[in-house]
Image (cartoon, grey):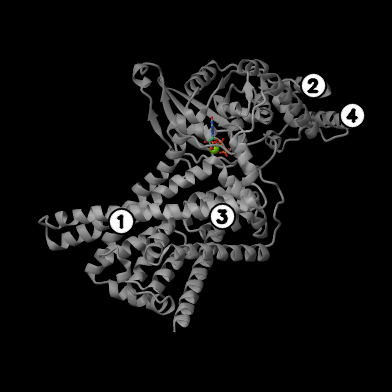
Amino acid sequence: MLLVEGLQIRYMLTTSSEKADSHILNREITIALAGNPNAGKSVVFNQLTGGNQIIGNWPGKTVERTEGWIRYRGRRIRIVDLPGIYSLSTYTEEELIAREFIISGTPDVIINVIDASLLERSLFLTLQLLEMEKPLVLAVNQLDVAESKGLKTDINTLSKLLGVPAIGIIATKGTGLNRLLTTAIELAEKKERITPPTYGGEIEQSIQELVRTLNEFHQEYPTRWLAIKLLEKDEWLKNLNLSKDILNQVEEIREELERTHKEPIEVVISSERYALASRIARNSQFYEKKKKTILQNLDTILLHPVLGYASMLTFLFVGFIVLFKIGAIGSSLLEHLFSKLEPLIIRIPIPETFRHLLWDGILSGFISGVTIALPYILPFYVFLSFLENSGYLARIAFLTDSIMHKLGLHGKGAIPIIMGYGCNVPAVLGTRILESRRERIIASFLSTLIPCSARTVVILGLVGVFLGVKWALLIYLLDLIIIYIAGLLMNRYYPGETPGLIMEVPDLRIPVLKPTLRQAWFRIKEFLYIALPYMMLGSVALELLELLGWFSSINRALSPVIEYWLGLPPITGIVLIFGMLRKELTLILLSTFSGTTNFSLILNPRQMFVFSFFVTLYVPCLATIVALKKELGNITASILVIMEIILSLLLAGLLNQFWIYIAR
Ligand SMILES: Nc1nc2c(ncn2[C@@H]2O[C@H](COP(=O)(O)OP(=O)(O)OP(=O)(O)O)[C@@H](O)[C@H]2O)c(=O)[nH]1
Ligand SMILES: [Mg+2]
C-alpha cells in the first residue's frame, strides 16, 4: 500500500480462541471507539486489531475513520477508530466524521475511551454520548498516568453514577483490554437501551415537555436526544423534516428559557453537562498529594522562554549527530559484509546478460538499499517514534508557535511539518489538525519541502559521508531558511487570517517501549516492503535502458538542465527522473549504475552538494503527490508540485553557478 498511515486499511486477525468457538454463529458486531483527542483510542485499536494507526502524545492524530476486523469467539467484529472529539455539537471536520458515524453508522456498541488523568473534561463528552442512548462501555484508560499524578479512580462508583459498565485499562500495556472487549460484546448482544443522564431544573422540564410531543411521532432516533438537539438548534436536524408545529413549540420553549437564563440555550445546556460531569468526577476520583515528578519539573525547563529554545536546539543537534554516527557506522559494517558476498555470486555460472541484470540490477539494488538507506532510516524512525510518544513533539510545536504565526500557521502546524522529517505522506495527511484550508495548503507545501527520511539518506549518505557532517547540516539549515521564506511569502500573498488559538500541550511522559517501537517497526517494514523492491526494480530498469542503448539519448535531451544549469554529470539526469518514485532511489541508482559506493569517484564536492540540495527540494515523491491530491484536490496539488519544481531548479541552479563563480 502506497499511502501508509491515516487511510483505511483492513486487517484480518484471528485469535486463538476462534477454533474452540467456531460452532457459534458468524455474527457481526460493530464497535466504535470514541473519545477525546489523545485519550488512547488508537492504542486500543492497534492492540485489538494489530493495526498501525499513528499514535503519539498530542491531540488530533487520527483524522479519518479507520476500520479493522477481528474474530473473537466465533463473532466477526468490526472495530472503528474515530477521530478524537471534545463534544458532539461543534463542527470541525473530525467532529463531523465521528458524529456522523455514531449517529448513522449504527455501531452496536460504543467504547468511550477516556483519559483517567483528565476525568472531568472527558466526562463532558461521555454525557453527550450517553444522551444518544446507544449501548456504551466506558474504558477508563491511562490509569498508570493518573496514578503517577496522585489520582485514584474509583471505577465502580464511576460506573454506578453513569449507569454504564466501566473498565479500568492501561492500553499501552494491554491491561484490561480483554475484559473491555468481552463487556462490549455482551452489551452489543443484549441490545439494551441505556438510561441517559438527567439534567437539572427547567432544562430538564423543557426536555421532558418536548419528549412528550415527540413521542407521538415515531422516530428512528431516541426522542430525548432529539429534544436536546432541537433545543440546541443543531444543524443536523434539518435532515429530519420535522413538522411546523414541533418547530414552533421548540421556538417557544427556547425563548422562554433564554428569557429566564439570559444566556443562549446551548450555553445553558453545556453548563448543565459541565456541572454533572464535575459532580461525577468529584465523587469517583480522589487526589492524594504527591511530589511533582521529575517529568513535571522538566517542563519548567523545556517550556522556558530561553532555556526551552536552548534545550530544543541542543537536543535536536545532538540527536542529529548521533543518528548520523549510527548510520555511518552501520552503513560501513554492512558494506563490508556484502563485499564478502560478492565473489560468491559472481562465480555462479549463468549467461553474461543475465548476470548483468541479476548482479548489477536486482542484487546491487538490494544491497545498496540495505547498506546505504537502512542504517539511517532505522534509528531515525525509532527516534521519531520516541519524539512523538513522549510529547516532546508537542513541546517543539509550542516553542515554535510564534515562528509558525509568521508563516500564517497556528503552532500546531509545526507538528505535521516536523513529522515530514519521517515521511511527507503522513505529514500532508496530518495537516488536518489545522483549522482552515488556507493553513492546510501552506502547511502541506512547507512539509513537502522538509527532507524526509529518504532525502536524509541522500544528504547523510552522500554529503555527510564524503564532505563531512557540517556540510550535511548546512543543507538542513538552508532548507529551513527556504521553508521560512516560502512560508512568509505564502502568508503574505495568499489572503486569509491566522487563527490565534493557544495550543494544548499534553503531559510529558516516558513512552511505553512496546507500542513505541512497534510504531517505528511499521514504518521500517514499509521501507522494506515498498522501498526495497522499488530499488531493485529501478536498478533493473536502469540496466535495461543501458542494454537497449537508450541511455545516451535521454541524457542528451536532459543535458541543458542537468549539465549546464545544475553542473551535474549526465548520468544523474535519468537517476533524478527515477527519483520521483522515491528519493533514496537517486543515490541507490547512482551507486548501482557506477558500480561503487565511493561516490567521490563520480561526483566532485560541488556536485555532491548540489545534487543533494536538488534532491531535497525537487518534486515530492509519487506517494506524496497522491496524498496532496487526496487532501487538497487536483488543481491545488498540481500548483504546489509545479511551484516546487520551479523552486528547486531555480535555487539548485543558482547555487551551482554561485559555487562555480566563487571557486574561480
Ligand atoms: N502511559 C500510558 N500512555 C498511554 C496509554 N494509552 C495511551 N497512551 C499514550 O497516549 C498517547 C495518545 O494515544 P493515542 O492512541 O494516539 O490517542 P488517540 O485517542 O487515538 O488520539 P487522537 O487520534 O489524537 O484522537 C500515545 O502517546 C500513547 O502511547 C496508557 O494507558 N498509559
Ligand atoms: Mg487516534
Mark carried by residue 332: 1
Which of the two marks, 3 or 4, is nearer to us in this view?
3
Mark 4 and ligand 1: say if the CB distance to the nearest ligand atom is below 8 Å: no
**Mark 2 or 1, which is nearer the eye?**
1
Q: Earlier in the sequence, mark 2 or mark 3?
A: 2
Q: Earlier in the sequence, mark 3 or mark 1?
A: 3
Q: Residues within 10 Å of mark 1 (few under 14, many from 20)?
A: some
Residue 136, numbered circle: none
Q: Residue 144 lies in what quarter of the image?
A: top right
- Classed neighbour count for the residue bearing mark 2: other residues with Cα under 10 Å, few (<14), some (14–19), many (≥20): few
Whether label 3 lies within 8 Å of ligand 1 gets the answer no
Viewer-proximal residue among 120 and 538: 120
How far is the residue under mark 4 from the one under mark 2? 14 Å
Task: Answer left or right for 657 relative to 430.
Answer: left
Q: Is residue 174 above or below residue 611?
A: above
Amino acid carrying label 1: it is: Ser
Residue that mark 3 sits on? 313
Query: In the rendered image, which residue does mark 4 sit on?
Result: 260
Q: Residue at x 46, y 36 (%)?
A: 513
- Residue annotated with mark 2: 200
> Looking at the picture, does residue 664 appear above or below residue 401?
below
User: Closer to us: mark 1 or mark 4?
Assistant: 1
- Disc 2/disc 3 C-alpha distance (Å): 52 Å
